[in-house]
Structure formats: C-alpha cells, structure tokens
C-alpha cells in the first residue's frame, strides 16, 4: 500500500532536486514543460500500480467466494449422509458368502451365481479378486472375501 506513495514522493523529490539549479537561473517554458511531463508520468505510473493492486484484490475475493460456494451442499443433499451414500454400492449380501469344502481344506468365497442374483453391481467388483475353486461337484466361480475387503467392499451384517 505504501510502495506507490513512497515511489511517487521519491520521484517528485528527485525532480525538484534536479530543478534547484534551474531556479537560480529562472524557469523558462522548457523547464515547465519537462516538469509537467514528469508529474504526468508519475501520476500515470501511480494509477497503473493502484489498478494492478485493485485487480489482485478482486481476484483473491473471487477465489474466496468460489471456494466457499464449492463447499456448499444442494438443498436436496441436506438430509442425506454423505458417508452412507458413498459406501452404499460397496456392501455385498452376506448370504452370498459361502464356505466350500475342497480337497485342500475349507475355502470361503462370495459365490458368483448368488452375487448375479442379489447384487446389482457385479461388474464393478475388481477382476483381481475373481477366483475359481475346484470341488468334488465341479468348479465354482466367485470372489475372494479378503481381496474384496482390501478393495473396500464389505458384507452386510444380517445373515
């Protein structure tokens, strides 16, 4: 704020300091013209600096209001829990979690056929979690529960 004022005072003082010898000889039209041009240049410089500072302030003000508007919720979202909406698609039905006997022991998987019947977003489950288990009744396709848990999915609490 004080930089333009100090710069203007310095410029005016330098102008008058260089004019001091001219006063001893008298001031003619050329010196008055130079003085007026110098004052006009200082005024234009001061106006440009002030305008630049004013634009910076308005950009900061616009950025603040824009940031404040981004944090506001819509009227339709006021009664909804954001956390509840975010995790709604990541809850798998508990009845699809099966315990299957294999010749290597007991394995737990989310059964593919059950998920296709009871879960709408099967195509969004991660492919890396897909498994195929061989049983005495043939192969079973499904998803590894530990892998799904690491990917952010969980089973419902009711059984």
Image: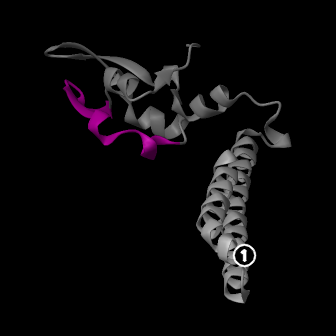
Q: Secondary structure at mark 1?
A: helix
Residue for point 69% across, 44% down? 67
Magenta-tinted stretch:
121-142
Residue for point 32% across, 26% down? 147
The picture places residue 140, in percent across and down from the top left corner, at 28, 32
Magenta span has 122? Answer: yes
- Say few, some or many: other residues with alpha carbon within 10 Å of mark 1 (under 14 / 14 to 19 / 20 or more): few
Determine which quarter of the picture holds residue 128: top left
Determine which quarter of the picture holds residue 106: top left
The picture places residue 132, in percent across and down from the top left corner, at 23, 33
Most distant residue in the bottom direction: 29
> Looking at the picture, does residue 149 appear above or below residue 27?
above
Most distant residue in the left direction: 104
Magenta span has 105? Answer: no
Residue for point 46% across, 41% down? 122
The picture places residue 53, in percent across and down from the top left corner, at 68, 56
Q: Which residue is mark 1?
A: 40
In this view of the protein, which residue sits in the foreground, 119 or 75?
75
> Looking at the picture, does residue 120 appear above or below residue 83?
below
The picture places residue 70, in percent across and down from the top left corner, at 70, 45
Left or right of 118 in this view: 26: right
Left or right of 127 in this view: 83: right
Residue for point 70% across, 52% down? 5
Whether residue 9 is visible: yes
Whether residue 139 is visible: no
> Looking at the picture, does residue 68 appear above or below residue 48?
above
Left or right of 116 in this view: 135: left
Image quadrant holding the C terminus, namely: top right
């Amino acid at each position: 704020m004080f930089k333009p004022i100090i710069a203007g005072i310095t410029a005016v003082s330098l102008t008058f300091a260089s004019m001091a010898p001219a006063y001893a000889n008298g001031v003619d039209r050329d010196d008055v013209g130079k003085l007026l041009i110098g004052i006009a240049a200082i005024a234009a410089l001061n106006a440009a600096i002030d305008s630049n500072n004013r634009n910076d302030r308005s950009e900061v003000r616009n950025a603040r209001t824009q940031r404040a508007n981004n944090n506001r919720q819509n009227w339709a979202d006021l009664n909804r829990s954001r956390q509840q909406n975010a995790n709604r698609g990541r809850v798998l039905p508990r009845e699809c979690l099966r315990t299957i006997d294999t010749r290597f022991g007991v394995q737990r998987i989310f059964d593919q056929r059950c998920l296709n019947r009871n879960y709408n977003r099967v195509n969004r489950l991660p492919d890396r979690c897909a498994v195929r288990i061989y049983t005495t009744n043939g192969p079973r396709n499904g998803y590894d529960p530990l892998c799904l848990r690491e990917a952010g999915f969980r089973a419902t609490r009711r059984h």
